[in-house]
Amino acid sequence: TGYLLDRWQSNKGPGNFSREIDVDFRKIWKYNRDQRLVWSRKWTEAIREEHIEALHGYIERFNNTQTQVDSLFNESRCSFIKTKRIIGCTTTAAAKYSSLIKAAKPEYILVEEAGEILEAHVLTALSTSTKGLILIGDHEQLRPKCKNYALSVEKGAGYDLNRSLFERLILAGQEHSTLHKQHRMHPEISQLVRFMTYPNLKDGEKTLNRPQIRGLRDRVTFVNHHEPESSANDLGDRLDANQTSSKENKFEAQMILRTVKFLAQQGYKTKNIVILTPYLGQLRLLRDMLSRDNDPLLSDLDSHELIRAGLVTTAAAKVGKTQIRLSTIDNYQGEESDIVVASLTRSNSNGDIGFMKSPQRLNVLLSRARNGIIMFGNMDTFLAS
């Protein structure tokens, strides 16, 4: 069959099988090249449709069987979960196991870090049995992550996919309560976010006794420089849609390394320090430079970003050295450290600071430190922005 089909499609005769061809089928061997091409396409499409129809039937049978299996498993799970007064899970799990959640008929849904969660993720947890929804979060910090910049609030096209239900309700005038006292930052640090974002923020008593940073005069230090940034062309930041590549600054990375060594000489342990940067390119550069003396401890999210880009292997961070925490600003939201050392990275004559112009991102950066924060950057670039 293959021999005859190949000869027919090549506009040839039946060859050695000329005498074997049935009289009823001899006419197709008289078709010219164009006619054979047309019929070949028709037959191929007919065969494809036949296979698709069969595949559709198999998929339907599989889905029905899977539904029956899930139903059998869920019967025992539902019986168990109905006995619990409190159910805790991630919003992803709430969507994945929505049938279980709805079977439990929770009357009140409590969502923590609601400002970071996509609206759709919250809605999956709601059901006809829901009597109350309690959202706890901060809409002045980073919004939920949206991989498609065209659908984000920042694009301004009206899709606002990364606007949380929490933020949407507050902007609509929904009645809400605000916490006015913070218990993390020394007042010299909290005055930065008080000036920018939280004018009514008050300091808890224990923040007044935060220890001074040894070896430094001030709790808030900005090291100004004019060394230019460079592009990490093999790496992109999906949150910065206006840039085709990520950014890095070798000078800042070198200064960060010296600062960490200086703090170690003052008696600080690496567990007391975190290094933050907005850019994945600078994160990689810092990781490579710091790995000579320390084992940079990346968060799962940052490690995933570098592994996905093919720049770090899964085993690369398993070296037995003193660990020091290194993170992008976005992936450090909700965490804190005694000392924050920040590499702002951007340094150019155009006043281009990319996604660092986001007040939410700057707010997260400035509100992570308990005792002191040291920032490296080009002040002229940021002022020109």
Image (cartoon, rainbow, N blue to C red):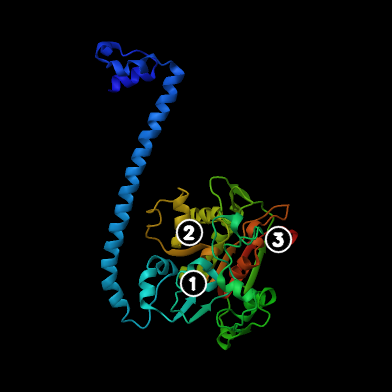
Q: Residue type at mark 1: give it.
A: Asn
Residue 292 appears in view: no
Q: Which residue is mark 2?
A: 302
Q: CA distance from mark 1 to mark 3?
A: 28 Å
Q: Which residue is mark 1?
A: 272
The numbered dot on residue 381 is none
Q: Residue type at mark 2: give it.
A: Asp
Occupied quadrant, residue 357: bottom right
User: Relative to residue 137, is residue 11 depicted above or below?
Assistant: above
> Could you tell which of marks 3 and 2 lies nearer the N-terminus?
2
Q: CA distance from mark 3 to mark 2?
A: 25 Å
> Could you tell which of marks 2 and 1 lies nearer the N-terminus?
1
Q: Residue most toward the right?
A: 384
Closer to viewer: mark 1 or mark 3: 3
Compared across the picture, whether 332 is left or right of 227 comes to left
Q: What is the x, y in percent for residue 153? A: 63, 62
Q: Which residue is mark 3?
A: 382
Tag 1's secondary structure? helix
Q: Residue type at mark 3: give it.
A: Phe
Compared across the picture, whether 369 is left or right of 54 comes to right
Tag 2's secondary structure? helix
From the viewer's side, name the closer residue of 173 and 335: 173
Write the residue at 38% across / 14% down: 30
Task: Kindly check if marks 1 and 3 are in contact, taking CB atoms under 8 A apart as contact.
Answer: no
User: Is disc 1 surrounded by few (<14), some (14 to 19) or many (20+) residues within 10 Å?
Assistant: some
Closer to viewer: mark 2 or mark 1: 2
